[in-house]
Image: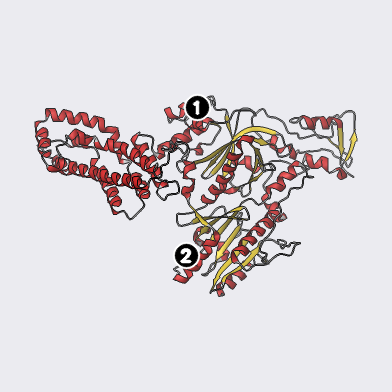
Amino acid sequence: MTYFKELQTSLQSEFPYNWKLAKEKEIVLEERVDTQLEFFERVQQKSTSSQCQNIDLIVPAKTRTQKEQMQLDQFLNIIGSELHVDTLETCIRRQENTIIEKNERKFEQNDEKRQFRIQEFIKTEKSYVETLNTLVRYVVNPLKSTMQQKHCILNTFKCHKIFLNIDQILDVNQKFLSDLQQGNRAFGLVCKEHIANFECYRKYLLEQSEAQKLHAKEFKINQVYRRFISKAREQREFKRKRLQDILVEPVQRISRYAMMLRDILQLTPEDHSDFRGLNQACEKAKEIATMADDDQTRTATMFLSLYQSIKDSPCSLINQKRSLIAHLDATEIHRVTNKPTRAVSLFLFTDKILVASKSCIDAKEIILDELLTSPSSTSTFSFPNTSSKNEKGLKFKGWADIESMSLVNGLTEDSLILSASKLQTSNMTSFEKYFSKGLRLFSVKSNMLNKLQQFKDLFQKTKALVKQCEFADRTFYKVWNGVPTFCNLYKPENYKQVLYKNDTAVVYVDDTLDTDRLFSHSYTSPWIVCLIQAQDMKGFRFHTCTRTHFPRYTTAKAATTTIDFESIFWNNMSILDQRKRKSTEYTRKQEGRPRPVSHRSSIPSIGKLFSDVDQLKVRETPAISIGSDTSCSMIEDDGHDDDEDEEEIDYLTIKTTHASMDSKILLEDEMHEQWEALASKYELIKPS
């Protein structure tokens, strides 16, 4: 109790407004867009809607009693179910060849047959390991023990060239067999973990052919070697097998893994605990057996291809730690005129979102497989000449950290809005300027609505998961009143290091905390702070304070109150999130980015200018001429495919010299015919 009151007091300086909890059992939050507004204003209003909520949960790291841990676990259950990074694994591996495609998989419900296949797998693995062990024990180890002596059977070079890394293969398979025989873990999980360590097979497969040739040569000309091998074969464990047959067994075994696991997978339902692990193990075994590129090589090749295909893309696009999550073809819609401006491709990575424009507005959809496996990228790893032709027709427009972006539905079901809600302009590069100019509106074709929804879902999940500082931090997911919520759990020391903090922070109070350092005022400091403290047999204590004043939740209908903590907690989280988004102060800060307009005497947007009839006097005139006492700074097309000017049509700048109170202001914009027509017909005069 003391800690709780101390925290309440310490938060008052930065979060002076205490929120009165709404205790209605059901709440109604209307998200209506005023259809009477100008299109740009409707888009802006829509961008403040609450369609996904992100919360930071701060839990002190301490040793808790069993009772305290049970209370914490109870609260975490209220927060939601844990979301793991591997939930995106299927999407990250979308470019790879899967072992069993969903439409090709023929599931057979036969548990008895499935158990027989598993036992057969373990039995053959045991036989395989015994064979390798015999080879290493009676041949490899004795030869290696004498290979540096003067009168050796095989010298070091020949010994390594014939037997390669067979002892390393034996080691990984012995561990695999040991876990399989213990049987205290899921079969699929064991296969996934151990086959992931079978990369040592690559070297063996790559050099096996030369090893067989050298063995045959030595067996023919080296009499001592021939006698040694013949004597070794007399051992009972050899079962009279020829050495060349044993040497080829690892090659055959790695191929059989994929086939045997596939057979077991076809007998495993998708909701079985073994399914995911078996699928991944099967995929990995096939990858190694076919000598496909490993993960690092595949990632490097993919991003090099992407770099070569997107003109003017930054070199930092190629990053081994980055993965491609999703891709979406869309059309960018001008936020003022509601007209299509360009065809684009959106690329969602694990840390960034990138926009690339296409060559024309009616360009075909990008076939991602072709884009990522272009011949130019797979044949060489050299960087392309900057003057080379961009065959894919893509040009880099901009990108931003996914943590700094927000995504909401557009005005129609086939659109989405992207805005840089937390973009830091202090260290912004030219690559981030695209999103700094304001929100971006995109639409897709009617046959791509499912893909659009999938892209939105993946964006929100990726944004939540990328916030994890280290593996100890966790992410939780919950849907409340139809709104998905992602909650990132941090220890206090990790939370301080987070660059992009969420607007809502929940502190689980069971230890002392230094809130001055925890919520030090910064660009991404939270707007809402909630304190949660477990009470003995009484649920949880809940206190909320905010950075600015939010109006209380009221309802015209008589509402039923509740004491259910889960309902009170999530209802108030939903209300506060909406109040925050509608807050003038919050909106002002989100829109407080420097405009790329050089003159501070800018007039309002064209849409606002013509709609505000009470502030303008419009007088028809037969013609307009530019007087010597007035100069106009107009938006011009510089001939480059750059949207610096196009995006700022609603921020036309007028600069006058020798201006008097009744000076006439000329409005002209050569980029858009409609404004040119208006400028030739009307003369606008400042109100007196």
Q: Within 10 Å of the Cα at label 1, are there few (<14), some (14-19), or many (20+) other Cα atoms?
A: few
What amino acid is labelled 1 in the image?
A: Asn
What amino acid is labelled 2 in the image?
A: Ala
**Colour pattern of the rendering:** secondary structure
The image position of residue 468, as x and y in percent, is 50, 53
* 567 lies above or below 587: below
State left or right for residue 248 relative to residue 385.
left
Asked which secondary structure carries label 1, the reply is loop
Q: Which residue is mark 1?
A: 385
Asked if residue 328 shows in the view, the reply is yes
Q: Residue at x 59, y 40 (%)?
A: 450
The quadrant of the rendering that contains the N terminus is bottom right
The quadrant of the rendering that contains the C terminus is top right
The image position of residue 451, as x and y in percent, is 58, 39
Q: Within 10 Å of the Cα at label 2, are there few (<14), some (14-19), or many (20+) other Cα atoms?
A: few
Q: Which mark is residue 399?
A: none
Nearer to us: label 1 or label 2: 2
Q: CA distance from mark 1 to mark 2?
A: 52 Å
The image position of residue 200, as x and y in percent, is 30, 41
The image position of residue 55, as x and y in percent, is 58, 57
Q: Which mark is residue 61?
A: 2
